[in-house]
Image (cartoon, rainbow, N blue to C red):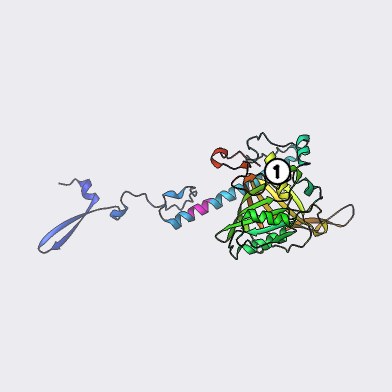
Amino acid sequence: EQTPQKAAANTHLFIYLGGTIMAITKKKGGHASLQGKKPLNTAKVKRTVSNNPGHIKNKLKRSEIYGKYLLEKKARKRQTRIQRDKEAEALGEDAPKKQTPRTLDNTRESEVTTVQPDDEEILADEAEDEFAPYFSDEIRPKILLTTRPMPSGELFHFIADLMRFIPQLYYYPRKTYSVKEICQFGANRKFTHLIVLSEKSKVCNGMLISHIRPSTAANGLGGPTAFFKVSNVIPSTDVPNNGSATSHVPELNLHGFTTRLGHRAGRFLGSLFPHNAQFQGRQVATFHNQRDFIFVRHHRYVFKEGNQVNKETGKKKTKAKLQELGPRFTMKMRWLQEGTFDTQFGEYEWMHKRKEMDTTRRKFHL
């Protein structure tokens, strides 16, 4: 027997099937599939977007929710920055200094071989090394450029950009000659450097640079030789708002080379360029080292009239802008070898050993 409470909670349906009367009891409260679920949000209250929508199984909905969260986070950050700038403007000179964010660069581990700007010993060594005649403009570099055997057609676009980037660069087909034979060939024809490009999937991925001119600092021999891993190659045609390079000799900007090894690598790259910059061309070749990655850029600086007027002279102020010419790529040194290219008997000044050297993300070598 059912109690009055149970009878009120249930609804009886009687169905006649083949002479038999069957009773079906149906509970109130909606469909059986909704039993045990939370009621819908009928109040239309706006809930905050969760930053972890991993519980949502629908991929499109999950992406939509996370996208909304990122937009809200960006808006909150922008509003906080605007409010902070207003408070700093109101306080004037009493405003607190901006906090410097912690980065891998400003928290890097101290390197024993870090060079100070006024180190007389380093300056004396660099005045007598293999690259001193290039930096004093006693010798102008003459560079031989070649590739791996049977290069793809796409690599020649990068070669054309390099020939516009580096003055006195001459391309010779590789054919079947070895690198040692090419070094001897270049030295006999008064070339100072050799560059060999390698590629993978029709994109340049390596650059071997060898100083093949004999020098007294290397006991009458050539050297050194370095291999750089090349990545993120963007040809000049793909650089946004790019300009056309002229035949003027660019100025050279070596930045971020702070250790003894970094100085040597920076001077090696700097020896590829003549040091009689033609300033009327307004072109700059930049090798910027950051976290042992060397970013290579080619710019022209442009002077334009601004809108602001100088109160003293009454003339409009001049603005300086940069126009990138291309190409754009990144280099990372893998090894540095004494003498010209010789993988069998050559002695290495430095070699990057990942498991032994990369023990922490805050240790850099250049």
Amino acid type at circle 1 is Arg
- Where does the image place residue 346, in percent across and percent down from the top left? 62, 44
107 up-or-down from 159: above or below: above
- Furthest residue to the left? 19
- Furthest residue to the right? 313
129 up-or-down from 242: above or below: above
Check if residue 65 falls in the magenta segment: yes
Give the dominant element type of the magenta stretch: helix, strand or loop: helix
Q: Is residue 356 visible?
A: yes
Q: Find the magenta span and give its range.
A: 64-69
Instruction: Name the residue that disc number 1 marks.
Output: 264
Seen in the image, is 9 located left or right of residue 131? Answer: left
> In which image quadrant can residue 335 be found?
top right
Q: Which of 177 and 61 is in front in this view?
A: 177
- Where does the image place residue 116, in percent across and percent down from the top left? 74, 36
Check if residue 44 falls in the magenta segment: no
